[in-house]
């Protein structure tokens, strides 16, 4: 070893920073998050007032949209079939549209309006979704003397779930559509194509209004693209989370015209792979109309989504202007897009898109993304090799020895990554196993201690221990840390290559940090700072600023969106895995380029161990009242409670009653279904799980939606008094006849409340071969029993349908099928009994209970 290397080794080994500077180092990164990332996310424009309209002609006026929403939300819950939805909301919209038409420029635009009343059925989520006489309000804005038949569709829904006024979901989007229509119709805005505004009256049913429009309305055949507006929260920034599919030109117009961008391919891939417990009308337009488009939704304060707390006063006021500016600009751009004439010509594959801290959009085609990812990976590998080659020259060490050192450090870093990830996942499993899930639900800061800190600790302590052991006979500390980060860059490069091969478009998220780290290495080599004691930190830190802000911005947006969603994702999955897994992935992208710098401080192992100590403290906190997830009104725990009367019929010719009972069916909606067990202490209420599952269709439960099917294991039945018995479903067998020697045909008629669930289960060797509904469940062999969800809005005409069964022999002496009919009175609170109200009052104050009355009646025929 030559004297040059000895001198350099001594310089590096002695050059460490005092430990007391480490708090400033930590504070710098925290302040960067709090002063840049969070403000960038929460940057909103001020609402324009009515008095500003003369100064800003053609601008969206947030104050008018706000006052319109106040009037709409006062109508109250707008459930399909209720007077509020079918009369109050319809009349409100027609009045607002009439005002717009009166103020419009008739010399510029022709405005047509229509109230669509439609009936149909289709398959959604393995169930037949059948609707009758549901309503949509549709408006078409056509420029005078315009010959284009291609239309742009803008859609949102005004109906709501039971018990909610729907101010955020999606009354907010409805008033934004009204204001956009008003602005476009009142000012001279050149448009190349007509625009259809669909005010959807049956989205929550689910998605029936959009299906009715796209399959039956006279204007639907000319629609070429859609802007779908929805909500999973209560205002805030709207995220673009689905684009296309296969129409990159749409993103071109979004990126060029949107005023306050918030979009991500990550959100698109998470949504399309089932990580988000929701669906939007975008799916209907895509699947039934083959229409491309953009899917946008509010996600702020998802705690109140689909609850009675979704109220007008909880929506941030500046939401109106932000979303209004975006939707107006996007509508103008797409209504003038030449691609709208024939979008099929421009279907060129997927798009990769993401906003940079809300400042601007980045978007490019999937093919371009693959090329960029590969080029960055190649440059990164080449840069690391050149660095190591150059390092041998600078230190006087043999290149073989340098590569061996790099190999050891690569192994150290790989071990740190794997162990950090395993420790974090172990914590997620442990917390769930001991009943401490969702301690972060109302206090997101707990995630820092539970999941960020163990990642920081392991990724820091393992390299720190190794570097402290080899300081006298290894590389200088500065070179060792740089090689360590090179090793992590190489690990990420390998992961990027794997993700490219799997066709994952979100690969850009890794490419971003690889690119900026590689840039810092290149700058260090060009300036020769990499062989200086501390100067190499300047390019390195500068090049880490933007990636750090980008990743922490994504973390903030992710937690803001997904934490509330875990309160309605059911009890079947461990939400800790999502929170811990996402945190671990984000940490692997930015922490290994920052955490190793702690090794430059004296007492580095002690400093890094503080993160481990914080993790232990937070695990303990999760077991104390501090970690209790729920807060009254702000972050409630969700339940459904259904007061139910049940009647089970024999299979004899008289269809005599085998048994009947009544009680309360309770469906917990998150991972902690036992949180209310104490409400049964010292009472005469007893819980019964699966008591009837062996002998009754659907366990005798009053199933309301397809999501309830997956929640049967955690739901329970409580025997109780009878509910009001008026208006429950009736079944009539209109005919029963042979259609062939082996086939028998039933004609049935069902009448009852405006929301009903039907379950049909062939018995013995009977096989359902035909019926009046969509044939997909039969043709594709859906699992039994078959599920039909039926609702009506205006017309209560009984549902009449046929069922045809086939057997292998002409002997039909046995039974053909079981049928259960469940009636739901979801908007008839006036009929709730005093006993039911008393039962609901037993729930803790921090619980939100969506409640109604149902009936369950089954027959064997």
Image (tube, rainbow, N blue to C red):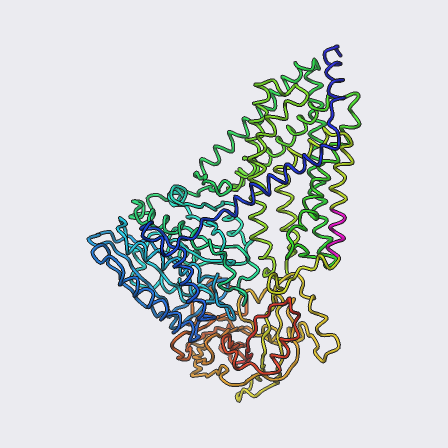
Quadrant including the N terminus: top right
Q: From the viewer's side, name the closer residue of 552 and 281.
A: 552
Q: Which stretch appears magenta? A: 615-623
Residue 584 image offset from top left, x and y in percent: 65, 43
Q: Is residue 819 in view from this perspective?
A: no
In the rendered view, would you say 759 is above or below 279? below
In the picture, residue 853 is in which quadrant?
bottom right
Q: Between 518 and 829, which is closer to the camera in this rendering?
A: 829
Q: Is residue 416 above or below residue 753?
A: above
User: Image check: 715 left or right of 248?
Assistant: right
Q: Is residue 675 in view from this perspective? A: yes
Q: Is residue 487 within the magenta segment?
A: no
Residue 723 drawn at (x, y percent): 58, 83
Magenta span includes 619:
yes
Q: Main secondary structure of the magenta part?
A: helix
Q: Residue at x 75, y 43 (%)?
A: 612
Q: Position of residue 672 (x, y in %)?
A: 67, 62
Q: Residue furthest front?
A: 51
């Amino acid at each position: 070893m030559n004297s040059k290397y000895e001198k350099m080794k001594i310089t590096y080994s002695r050059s460490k920073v005092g430990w007391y500077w480490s708090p400033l180092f930590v504070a710098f990164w925290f302040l960067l998050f709090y002063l840049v990332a969070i403000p960038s996310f929460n940057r909103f424009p001020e609402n324009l007032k009515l008095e500003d309209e003369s100064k800003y002609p053609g601008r969206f006026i947030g104050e008018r949209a706000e006052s319109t929403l106040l009037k709409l939300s006062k109508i109250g819950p707008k459930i399909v079939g209720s007077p509020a939805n079918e009369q109050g909301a319809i009349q409100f919209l027609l009045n607002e549209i009439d005002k717009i038409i009166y103020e419009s420029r008739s010399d510029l635009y022709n405005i047509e309006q229509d109230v669509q009343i439609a009936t149909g059925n289709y398959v959604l989520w393995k169930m037949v979704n059948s609707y009758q006489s549901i309503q949509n309000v549709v408006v078409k804005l056509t420029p005078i003397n315009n010959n284009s038949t291609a239309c742009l569709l803008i859609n949102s829904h005004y109906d709501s779930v039971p018990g909610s006024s729907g101010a955020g979901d999606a009354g907010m989007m409805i008033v934004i559509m009204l204001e956009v229509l008003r602005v476009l119709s009142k000012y001279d805005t050149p448009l190349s194509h007509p625009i259809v505004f669909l005010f959807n009256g049956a989205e929550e049913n689910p998605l029936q209004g959009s299906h009715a429009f796209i399959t039956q309305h006279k204007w639907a055949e000319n629609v070429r693209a859609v802007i779908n507006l929805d909500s999973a929260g209560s205002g805030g920034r709207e995220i673009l989370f689905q684009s296309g599919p296969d129409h990159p030109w749409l993103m071109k117009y979004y990126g060029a015209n949107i005023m306050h961008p918030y979009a991500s391919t990550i959100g698109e891939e998470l949504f399309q792979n089932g990580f988000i417990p929701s669906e939007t009308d975008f799916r209907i337009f895509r699947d039934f109309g083959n229409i491309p488009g953009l899917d946008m939704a509010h996600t702020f304060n998802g705690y109140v989504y689909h609850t009675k707390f979704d109220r007008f006063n909880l929506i941030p006021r500046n939401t109106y202007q932000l979303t209004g500016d975006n939707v107006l600009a996007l509508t103008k751009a797409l209504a003038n897009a030449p691609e709208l004439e024939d979008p099929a010509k421009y279907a060129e594959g997927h798009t990769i898109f993401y906003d940079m801290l809300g400042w601007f959009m980045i978007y490019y085609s999937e093919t371009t993304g693959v090329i960029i990812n590969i080029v960055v990976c190649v440059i990164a590998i080449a840069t690391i090799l050149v660095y190591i080659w150059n390092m041998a020259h600078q230190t006087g060490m043999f290149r073989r020895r340098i590569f061996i050192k790099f190999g050891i450090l690569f192994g150290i870093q790989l071990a740190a990554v794997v162990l950090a990830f395993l420790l974090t996942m172990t914590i997620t499993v442990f917390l769930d196993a001991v009943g401490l899930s969702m301690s972060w639900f109302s206090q997101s800061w707990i995630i820092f201690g539970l999941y960020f800190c163990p990642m920081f600790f392991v990724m820091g302590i393992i390299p720190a221990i190794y570097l402290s052991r080899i300081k006298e006979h290894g590389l200088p500390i500065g070179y060792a840390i740089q090689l360590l980060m090179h090793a992590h860059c190489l690990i990420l490069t390998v992961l990027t290559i794997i993700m490219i091969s799997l066709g994952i478009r979100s690969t850009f998220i890794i490419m971003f940090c690889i690119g900026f780290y590689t840039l810092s290495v290149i700058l260090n080599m060009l300036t020769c700072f990499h062989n200086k004691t501390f100067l190499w930190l300047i390019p390195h830190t500068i090049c880490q600023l933007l990636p750090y802000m980008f990743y922490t911005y994504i973390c903030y947006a992710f937690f803001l969106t997904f934490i509330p969603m875990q309160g309605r994702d059911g009890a079947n999955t461990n939400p800790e895995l999502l929170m811990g897994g996402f945190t671990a992935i984000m940490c692997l992208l930015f922490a290994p380029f920052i955490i190793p710098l702690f090794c430059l401080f004296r007492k580095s192992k002690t400093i890094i161990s503080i993160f481990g100590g914080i993790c232990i403290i937070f695990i303990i906190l999760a077991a104390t009242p501090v970690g209790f997830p729920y807060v009254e009104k702000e972050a409630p725990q969700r339940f459904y409670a259904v007061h139910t009367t049940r009647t089970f019929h024999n299979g004899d010719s008289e269809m005599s009653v085998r048994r009947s009972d009544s009680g309360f069916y309770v469906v917990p909606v998150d991972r902690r279904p036992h949180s209310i067990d104490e409400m049964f202490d010292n009472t005469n209420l007893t819980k019964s799980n699966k008591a009837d599952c062996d002998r009754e269709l659907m366990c005798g439960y009053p199933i309301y939606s397809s999501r309830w099917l997956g929640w049967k294991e955690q739901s329970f039945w409580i025997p109780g008094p009878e509910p009001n018995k008026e208006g429950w479903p009736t079944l009539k067998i209109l005919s029963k006849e042979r259609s062939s020697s082996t086939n028998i045909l039933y004609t049935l008629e069902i009448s009852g409340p405006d929301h009903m669930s039907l379950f049909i289960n062939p018995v013995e060797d009977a096989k359902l071969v035909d019926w009046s509904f969509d044939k997909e469940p039969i043709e594709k062999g859906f699992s039994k029993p078959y599920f039909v969800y039926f609702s009506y809005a205006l017309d209560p005409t009984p549902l009449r349908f046929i069922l045809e069964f086939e057997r292998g022999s002409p002997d039909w002496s046995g039974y053909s099928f079981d049928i259960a009919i469940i009636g739901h009175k979801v908007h008839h609170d006036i009929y709730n009994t005093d006993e039911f109200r008393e039962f609901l009052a037993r729930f803790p104050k921090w619980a939100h209970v969506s409640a109604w009355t149902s009936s369950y009646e089954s027959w064997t025929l």
